[in-house]
Amino acid sequence: MGLIKLLSTVDQFKQVNTAGAVMLTGDQLKRYQRYLLRIAEDIISVCEEENVTYHLTGGSALGAVRHGGFIPWDDDMDIDILGSDFDRFEKAFLARFSDKYWLHTYRKKNYGMLVNRVRLKNSVFRAREDSDNDECGFFVDIIRIENTYDNPVLRFMHGMDCMGMGFLLSCRNYCYKRKSAIALAGSNKRLAAVLRVKIFIGMLISFRSLDKWAEKTQRCYSRCKNNRSEYVSVPAGRRHFFGELYRRSDFVECEKALFEGHMWNVPKNYDLYLGNMYGNYMEMPDPDAREEHVVLEIRFPDGATDSENDDRQDA
């Protein structure tokens, strides 16, 4: 686990300065947030109609509790869905919105991630993971909440397997996308060194395709089939299995919170969750400590103005 933490790139990439990256600020950021809100509205409408268990997570949950909506500088949205409900959500969502969105899961060829993404067609938001992805529209992340075992020994073994498989999948992914990954590291020598180690490990396990590693990892994450287990985890989350291990009663059960005029679900014990993720979460971070996502390219739908797009969405 120490090696995995040492070689983690999640937080480093969120604060890396990459040549040519686009910084979303001001009116452009607010415009982008309006699109994210519309995507989230469609996702949550399906969840609520199909009785799919969901809640806002990450910075979106923090925004709901602290700001009643978006964190002012935030450029993404995150939603958790109970893993046992995900296939039902996927089927219903695509039946209703396949003409409007792409839904990327581990089944998408060469996607190589277990964070699912709903992406808006006819738009472009090219992030660091999208070097060879033509379906890179504006997106909302959907992360699965997985069951895990009540028996502490089995839970520990499940967690270790999830940590190991997630790490190997990450290495295989960076190996597959090695040229663009090294380029994104820019002048950050520490990040570049970590990436080279992970790429080397990825080469050692390249006897299995990226898609097969993703499939195998998802099977590991969702191994526990007890939908009434006392404990759940978010193995694909930024803090991985052990860092996002909760009692079901704290994390799966929900209450409503205001988010940009909507009353949407957040974890019932959001104080526990947000404290775990952000420490003193009601305290505003220093500007230098704020996360910034790497955006390589952005294009709004049809290049239209805000008002034109608003009219089209309402039509």
Image (tube, helix red, strand yellow):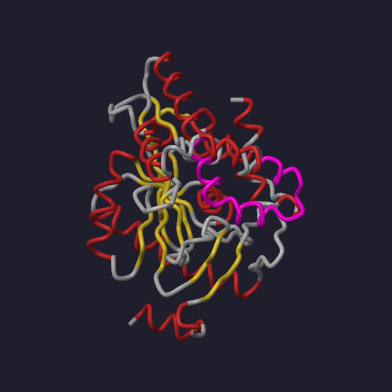
Q: Is residue 105 above or below residue 168?
A: below
Q: Residue at x 50, y 83 (%)?
A: 303
**Residue 194 appears left or right of 165:** right
Does residue 289 appear anywhere in the picture? yes
Task: Please indicate whether residue 288 sits to the left or right of residue 53 in the image.
Answer: right
The relative height of residue 214 versus residue 311 in the rendered view (above or below) is above
Q: Position of residue 268 (x, y in %)?
A: 43, 38
Q: Which image quarter is the N terminus in? A: top right
Residue at (45% x, 58% y) in the render: 140
Position of residue 242 measured from the top left corner of the image (x, y, whole percent):
52, 28
Residue depicted at 56% across the width and 71% down the height: 298
Measured from the top left, where is residue 53 in percent x and y?
32, 44
* Viewer-proximal residue among 177 and 308: 177
Q: Is residue 107 left or right of residue 173?
A: left
Residue 11 vs residue 74, the one in the foreground: 11
Quick check: 105 above or below 40?
above
Task: Classify 218 as above or below 261.
Answer: above
Where on the picture, by quarter, is residue 8?
top right
Span shown in magenta: 167-194
